[in-house]
Structures are given as structure tokens and as C-alpha cells.
Image: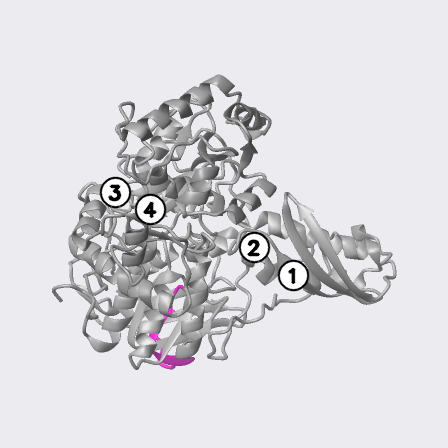
Amino acid sequence: MKRVWKVLFPLVIAVMAIAIVACNTSGSSKESSVKTGGAKPASVASRTVTPLKPGTYTESVKGNALGFNVEVVLSANRIEKVTVVSHNDTPGIAEAAIAVLPAAIVDQQSIGLDGVSGASLSSAAILQAVEKAITEAGGNPSEYRVRGEPFYLSRKALLQIDGTPRGPEATPSRWDETYDVVVVGAGYAGAAAAYAAQTNGAKTVLIEKMPFIGGNSQINGGVWAAYTSKKAADLQKRKNLTPDTAAKHIQDTIVGGDYMPVEVMVKNMVYGSPFYLDLMFDNGLNVRDALTMPGGHYGFRTYTLEHEQGFDITEVQKKLLNQAQVAVKLNTKLVRIYREGNLTGKVVGVAVYTVDGIKTIKANKAVILTTGGFSANVAMRSAQVPSLTEAMPTTNQISQTGEGITFAQEVGANTMQMSYIQLYPFADPNTGVLDAYAVIPFSGPSSGVVYVDYKGERYVNEGERRDVNAKAAMDSGGFPAFCILDQKIVDQGGFTGQDTVNRGIENGRIFKADTLEDLAKQIAAHAYKSPSGVPGSVNIAPGTLTNTINTHNGYVRNKQDPAFRKVITNAALTIDQAPFYAIPQWPSVHHTMGGLITTNKLEVLDVFGNAIPGFYAAGEVTGGVHGTNRLGSNAGPDACANGYIAGYYAVTSKVPDFIAGK
């Protein structure tokens, strides 16, 4: 974005982070079981508790509309095992809590632990289930509500340098492990890079500081822009859509980024996107029956994943990593990059921080950095854009802290466009989360959804790009805004489904009514976090909302929007079939467009413009692909296409065949 505008409501970002607690050294791509490590709190050994009735207790918890089924094994005086059997939290979000919290409860015999940041509702559900089991077994839950030793590192330890041991400064003379290629960061870009390197003959390891593969990618909006694919022709024919072109996708991306994207990097993304999407299709990826034209795109090129979340692709990537026998090390944090020759030679390896201490890993061919952006690092982002304080929430996992950029700078890497930071305009107003329901407003403009403000009036061209939408919301004079749609859009739009809508209603994220007047009353019946932090309400006049939608329906029929000049195509639908739906929305820090400077072969450049030998980067850790503003659904293609190119080139010294004009 050219400018980022300060939000006045103080949604407080949690300050605790997931532990980096174990290291998977098996060489398998299967995720390791989590060990909390460290000495048990003295209170566990000395505690006297009310005797429990031994047994296995299955508890159902439905807090904040999130259903969790948790199995708790108790002995006479201990919590022996905690297992989450099933849940209906947003896929990808709950995994952070599930990965570490059950083991921590057992390790510390405590239900007084802090929740995992980014998965607070899931954490609360797990803790509540264990409390219910203790009560059912005749115990006293208060005896287990103790603090003990934290199972996490502090947020400071997860961020950048301070708080985590760095490892030796000098390049090791002896290494703990050796691979041909070391990929750092297991999101979309890292998984693509590791797969490309391994399948082209390099012994590859993928390391990840979180306790699971997928990182920030698995909670993204589940959308993917590709000008073509093996499914495109059928969708275009059945939906009566004009076929897209690579040239148009390139042009829209460059214009959408205010002509600041680097064209060769955009071409990598655009030409690589169909290749990687087809690879996913070949290995089981499913998409919704739709091609959409979200804000800033002027071609029907955006696919919506089956579950409307990025974990659909993450699951396929995990399968490919396993088939290729890529070594994966979770709970393994990068703490240093080693470069020979006093910052003049090759990058030769890394140091990582694990539960077993510092380890060094040699890279015979290359280190590929795919550590993502820094939206969750308040200090780092506010240094670039001072208004992005802790009061502004983020859609990101807590892992997006940017230390990969810092460590790359330490060995001479240069950066670009670091102050271009995007807000997602449609996040959950109360949490800042980008859940499946927050994807509906993004995907819906070409189908006719309408955005209204606190008065029930349109405030923006719904087909505009994200930075325009975010600024318009914050300039609307109230909080929050809403996306309005009807049953016809749900049934015919193709980008969402009744299953998603029903879950949203159950979870309190989508409001439903039989008339627009009653929908306005539904909106008024709910509380929203006000700028003062106290729950408040929105009182839309029923007649105003009805008039807004009826006026927009006229624009759709006439294929002309005199109010905001939105492009209205034949795919647009009127909103006139009950029931009607409203989705609250508000901007949240989403994507950092700036990062490391690379060549189109993903070689990292130093401050003099020279490629650093043996050092590559891809995904959100890099800059130059999106310019001032990223078009939605371009992030996945950027990460996966450029990640694949980095892994391929690092091993073969060639670019893949899908790159035009190579």
C-alpha cells in the first residue's frame, strides 16, 4: 500500500507464542510428536490432589460455537493423556493449540496454562474439556489450575534475535548434519522449494520453527489466481466466461501494485501458477465450481479451494514431501546463516535452535530462505509504518515475525519495498482473523455482493483492490462494515457453499434473516468491539439497507454502477432471494510486500547488487513481486511458483520449462 491508515479500535494482540520444543531428526516428512522439554515444575512432584476415578473420559465442549471432542485419560492422581479427537474450528487455526497444549497439560499437570496465541478459542476448549474430565472423575479442578513453568518461549524469544541463543559466530569446522539443500520455513514456498530440490537429485531438509508444516500458508484464504489450468476450459465454457491470458494477469498485477512490481518476478508467478496448480490437481486438490474476479483482477482467474482455506494445498504438499522422502525438522528455529569469506563467499549452512540446544546444518549446494513476512512482528512492522501498532490485529500466524530477513541482512542481503504493508479489508472485526467466512467478501464482488457501512450504505466499489477497500472502510465513520449477499449468490456463485454458510451462522460469524429489514435487526442484535474496547452495537435503519440493496440490484440489471463505477459483468447476480446474509468485516494487517531482493532465479542479492552464492529466497520473505499492493489470490502462486523455481535452479542451474522466454 502507498499509505496505511491507523485503526482506532484497540484489539489487543496476544503476547505469548508457541513453543519451539522439539526437533524431528528422523528424516521423515511426518510431523513429530511434541515434547515440552525442561524440568517439571516442583509443584507437580509435591502437589497433593483429590483422588480421581481412573478411566478414559470423552468430553464435548462447545464454547464460542466451536465444538471440540477431547479424550482425557486419568489415573488416581494424574492427567495421563489428552487427545483432541475432533473439532470444528477453522482448519489450520486449531492445529497450533492441538500440537502443543495437550502435551503441556500432561507435562505440567495443569489446566492453568496460557492459551496458544492465534488459537485462543481452541486452547480454551481443550483446557475446559480437561477440567470437565477432572470434575467427572471426582477431582477438584482448582488443584490443577497452577502456573508452573511456561511451555512456550516468550514472544521476545520468537522474534528476531533477542531471547534465543544464536549459535557460534564463526563458520563451524564440524557440522552436526549435512545436506545438499537446506530450506528454511515450511509454508507454501518452502514446501515447493524442498520438493523441487529433492526430486531433482538433491538431498534436502526442510526446517520449520512451528510444530507443524504449513505455517501461515495453511490459514490463508484458500484462493489461487491462474490464467489457465487443466480445469480452466471446462469452467469457462460452463460458466460462459471469457478465457484469460498470461499477459492480462501480468498487467493486472503490475497495475494493481502501482507499477512497482518487478516484471520478471511477476512473470515467474504468472507462468508458474498453472504449472503448480496442475501439479496440485494431479495429486488430489479439489476446488469449488467457480472462477471469480476479485478486487483488482479484471479476468476470471481465481479458483477457490474446496474448504476455502490454504490447508487444502498444504495437505497435498505434505503428501508430496513424504513421497519424495524430504527430511523435515519441526520445532527447529533458524538462528544464524553462515557465509564464507567475511561476507564475500558462499552461504554454506545454518545454525538452528532446538529442544536439544543449538545444532549446525551444512548445505553443500544451497540455503533457500522461505520464512515468510513480518506482519506479526509489531516492532518490525511499525518501524516501517508507525501506525501499525499493537492495537492493530493481524490475520497472520504468530510465526510471521521476520527474523529470516534480519538474519539474511546479517550476511549482506539487501531489501526493498519494506514499507508496503497490506491490510486485509474483510477480517473478523473482533479478532482480526482471516477465517473461511472472511473469504466470502473477497471472492464475491463479481457475483454481486455488496459492502455496507454502519449506516447500511455502500462506501466503496466492491471490485476495487484491497488497499482501496481497507482505507474506505476506515474512512466510513463507523465500525465495523458488512458484506451483504443472498441465497442465490450462495447457490450460484460457486465460490462458497451452504456448508460454509451454516458453520458461519453456528459460529456467530454470519447473520441470517428472511428479509433485508430483519437482517438489519440481526446486525443490530450483535455486539462488536468499539474503539474504546467496550462492546458496542450498530443500528442500521432497516429501510436504508433495503434501499441500498434495491438500488444496487438496479445497477446489476443495467450493468452499470453510476455510484462507484464498479465493473459489472454477466456473472453478477441481484440480491433478492431469501434468506439474506450479512458478514461483519474490518481491516487487519495481512501481507508484507517488501523483503529480500532476488534475481528472477531467486538468487539473493547483496547491497552491491551481486548474487550471494548458494543463497536463495522465495515467497513473502522477498520483495518486488507485488509492489505497493498485492492482488488477492496472487500470494499462493507467488510462493509456490517462485519456491519451485528456487529449488529447481539451486540444484540444476536451470530454470523450469514453464518460464516463458527462459
Sequence order check: which comes first, mark 2 or mark 3? 2
Residue behind mark 2: 94
Circle 4 sits in a helix, a strand or a loop, which is it?
loop
Instruction: State the residue at coordinates (41%, 39%).
Output: 441
Q: Is residue 540 left or right of residue 477?
A: right
How much space separates mark 2 and mark 3, taking CA atoms?
32 Å
Q: Is residue 519 left or right of residue 214?
A: right
Is residue 332 located in the magenta-colored stretch of the structure? no
Circles 2 and 4 in contact, beta carbons < 8 Å? no
The x and y percentages for residue 381 are 37, 44
Rendered image quadrant of residue 597:
bottom left
Sequence order check: which comes first, mark 2 or mark 1? 1
- Which of the labelled discs sits on residue 292, or is there none? 4
Circles 4 and 3 in contact, beta carbons < 8 Å? no
The x and y percentages for residue 160 are 41, 55
Instruction: State the residue at coordinates (52%, 55%).
Output: 91
What's the amino acid at mark 4? Thr
Circle 1 sits in a helix, a strand or a loop, which is it?
strand
Of badges 4 and 3, nearer the viewer stands 4
Given residues 653 and 415, the one toward you in this image is 653
What's the amino acid at mark 2? Ala
Range shown magenta: 166-185
Residue behind mark 1: 84
What's the amino acid at mark 3? Thr
Sequence order check: which comes first, mark 4 or mark 1? 1
Residue 295 seen by the camera: yes
Q: Is residue 638 left or right of residue 113?
A: left
Sequence order check: which comes first, mark 3 or mark 1? 1
Of badges 4 and 1, nearer the viewer stands 4
Residue behind mark 3: 628
Circles 2 and 1 in contact, beta carbons < 8 Å? yes
